[in-house]
Image (cartoon, rainbow, N blue to C red):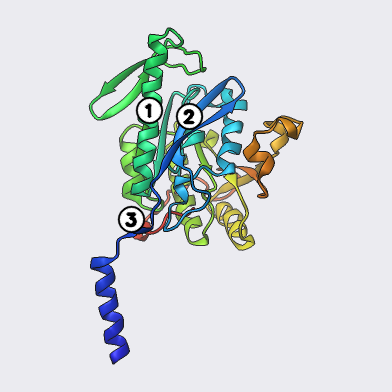
Amino acid sequence: MRTSLLHSSLEDEDEYFFNPELFMNKTLAPVTYRFPGLEQTVWASSASSTDHDQTGEIIWPISVFLAWFVVSQRERFRDHQAIELGAGCAGLPGLIASRFASDVLLTDGNDSVLETLKRNVAEMIEQEKIEEKRGQSSTSISRSGDSTALKGTTSSNGSRGSFKRVEASSLVWGDGKSAQAIVDDGWRPQILLGADIVCWIDFVIPLLQTVKFFFLHAREPLQAVLYLGFVNRANATERLLFTQANAMGMLVTRIPAESFLPLDKKDWPTELRDTTQKLELLAISLDRTVDGFDRTVCMDNSGMIGRATPC
């Protein structure tokens, strides 16, 4: 009985006195990443490791890896909406995609991370204003309500479109209301991006539910695709990703790095040359050969709300 009472007492104390911010390193610094023909500066944590679910405050090599794919395959993004899932504080692949896609939404489920992500989106837009004044870009900025968007025809960084939205928003995987709110706001993404968002096995199914939900709401569902920067940290998690994707009517294929990175590794960015991780790029899309590929997704897993982000 004493143990039970003590446990209950500790739970009460945790509820009222535990402050996660005591374990958070909120020191941010600007970091500039250079790609063929363009560069991107973002704010991120300068730490090499994190505590208390702050992995989203660090830009990992896989994000740079995926961003290189976006740059090299920019034509895939022309005239399409794109959403980055689990963008973290920087949303590097998503911000790069915003140079080429018609509209880009960067999402994350961690409030602390989302705060920095919104800062990076806002600062990129401010930089576009500066470039416009200098005559380096024909892109202009417009604000409609609470939304901030890029507006123009073409720019020196390759963006185009008569009206461009670049925004950051909260998204909880597996939560139908969270995903539906994004669709109701006019997002019909043809392309999804995700860098190192498959880490914990518990998050695989909610992630795939969310991915398929967006596929089915895309303007052309059978052409919708998730480009996933992937690091295999557990074979069981990788197996579940492939088997569950197939069970939900989706196909997973691998894209070789040689198709978008320089052939000579000495020309790779330092983050990719020095990493000991095996970086992979997966493409996930609907598989019309699987029965039920177009079946509506049932998302009632709101238990992901408030839980640690997957990576």
Q: Amino acid at mark 2?
A: Thr
Q: Which mark is residue 21?
A: 3
**Residue 201 drawn at (x, y percent):** 52, 61
Q: Residue most toward the bottom?
A: 1
Q: Nearer the viewer, residue 177 or 13?
A: 13
Q: Are marks 2 and 1 in contact (CB under 8 Å)?
A: yes
Secondary element at image label 1:
helix
How far apart, in angstroms, are the residues tagged by discs 2 and 1?
Answer: 9 Å
In the rendered structure, the answer to whether residue 198 lies left or right of residue 104 reads right
N-terminal of the pair, mark 3 or mark 1, is 3
Residue 162 in sight here: no
Q: In the figure, 185 relative to 77: above or below?
A: below
How packed is label 2: few (under 14 Cα within 10 Å), some, or many (20 or more)? some
How far apart, in angstroms, are the residues tagged by discs 3 and 1?
Answer: 25 Å
The residue pinned by badge 2 equals: 41
Secondary element at image label 2:
strand
Specify the quadrant that holds the N terminus: bottom left
Q: Nearer the viewer, residue 122 or 168?
A: 122
Residue 149 found in image quarter: top left
**Residue 259 drawn at (x, y percent):** 70, 32
How packed is label 1: few (under 14 Cα within 10 Å), some, or many (20 or more)? some
Q: Amino acid at mark 3?
A: Glu
In the rendered structure, the answer to whether residue 273 lies left or right of residue 59 reads right
The residue pinned by badge 1 equals: 123
How many marks the image carries: the answer is 3
N-terminal of the pair, mark 3 or mark 2, is 3
**Residue 93 drawn at (x, y percent):** 51, 34
Q: Are marks 3 and 1 in contact (CB under 8 Å)?
A: no
- Point 44% across, 23% down: residue: 102
- Point 50% across, 27% down: residue: 40
N-terminal of the pair, mark 2 or mark 1, is 2
